[in-house]
Image (cartoon, helix red, strand yellow):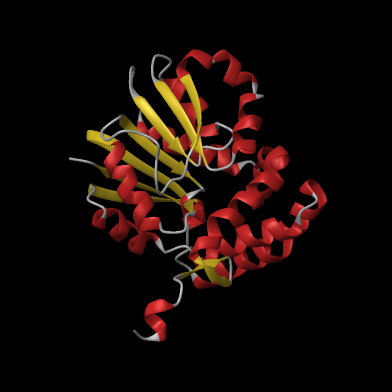
Amino acid sequence: MSDDDTSPRTTHFGFQDIPETEKSGRVHGIFTNVASKYDIMNDVMSGGVHRLWKDAMMDWLAPRPGQRLLDVAGGTGDVSFRFLKRAPTAHATVCDLTESMLIEGRKRAEAEQMASHLDWIVGDAMALPFDDATFDVYTISFGIRNVTRIDEALSEAFRVLKTGGRLMVLEFSQLPNPAMQWAYDRYSFNVIPAMGQAIAGDRDSYQYLVESIRKFPDQETFATMIRDAGFEQVKYRNLTMGVAALHSGWKL
């Protein structure tokens, strides 16, 4: 057997290459560190635009009464709260690898108001702790780029969705104009880690988050990955000229 056959599989952690077995623990560490400041940092980093992106996600998703939502990497519950505000008789399960993020989410006023329609579950996107065909909708927002093997997460999404169920992914993406991408990169790499230090006392975690955005596949490549997982009618919409993108697919 060659050395190549016995060497561990590697993946990227920001701009570093690390053994796949290490990534989950490192991501867990980052979000444990930033959990208490996560929501305020989202507002500061994006100038509040992330709220508009999540509203656009809900507009396209069009939540309906009685639906069961699984929000993976759901963190502090932002997307689940929005879903339940539009469909109060629906049910949302917030699933996240990092328990401290879920704890922060449960402190929010909406969590108490919606408690009878909300579950908070610690779980891994690549091995979800749910039965097949359980949910009508699967969402993941700004989380899939942190998954070690994206193809496995998409396969798990397909598995836990009912026939007729819908996948929707909100993620940072690539701007189609090189000059605009250059300007966005300058902002990202120079300003966001400094904000992380000032607000959360954690420069390194936000340096990783910026690097992870640049390593994520572009819109067309990611759409192909969703199709390869079995989803149909796969489409995407750019938000803020491609700073973020919404990808939609159906299990038919």
Query: Which residue occupies 64% across, 47% down?
Result: 31
Q: Residue furthest left?
A: 252
* Residue 105, image x, y percentages: 61, 29
Asked if 47 appears above or below 145 in the picture, the reply is above
* Residue 166, image x, y percentages: 29, 37
* Residue 45, image x, y percentages: 67, 49
Q: Residue furthest front?
A: 1
Asked if 28 appears above or below 12 in the picture, the reply is above
Left or right: 69 in relation to 41: left
Between residue 181 and residue 200, name the one nearer to us.
200
Query: Which residue occupies 72% across, 60% down?
Result: 204
Left or right: 133 in relation to 216: left
Between residue 57 and residue 208, name the one nearer to us.
208
- Which quarter of the figure is the N terminus placed in? bottom left
Left or right: 119 in relation to 60: right
Between residue 177 and residue 92, name the one nearer to us.
92
Query: Which residue occupies 55% across, 70% down?
Result: 18
Query: Which residue occupies 39% across, 41% down?
Result: 128
Residue 250 appears in the picture as rendered: yes
Dividing the picture into quarters, in which one does residue 226 lie? bottom left
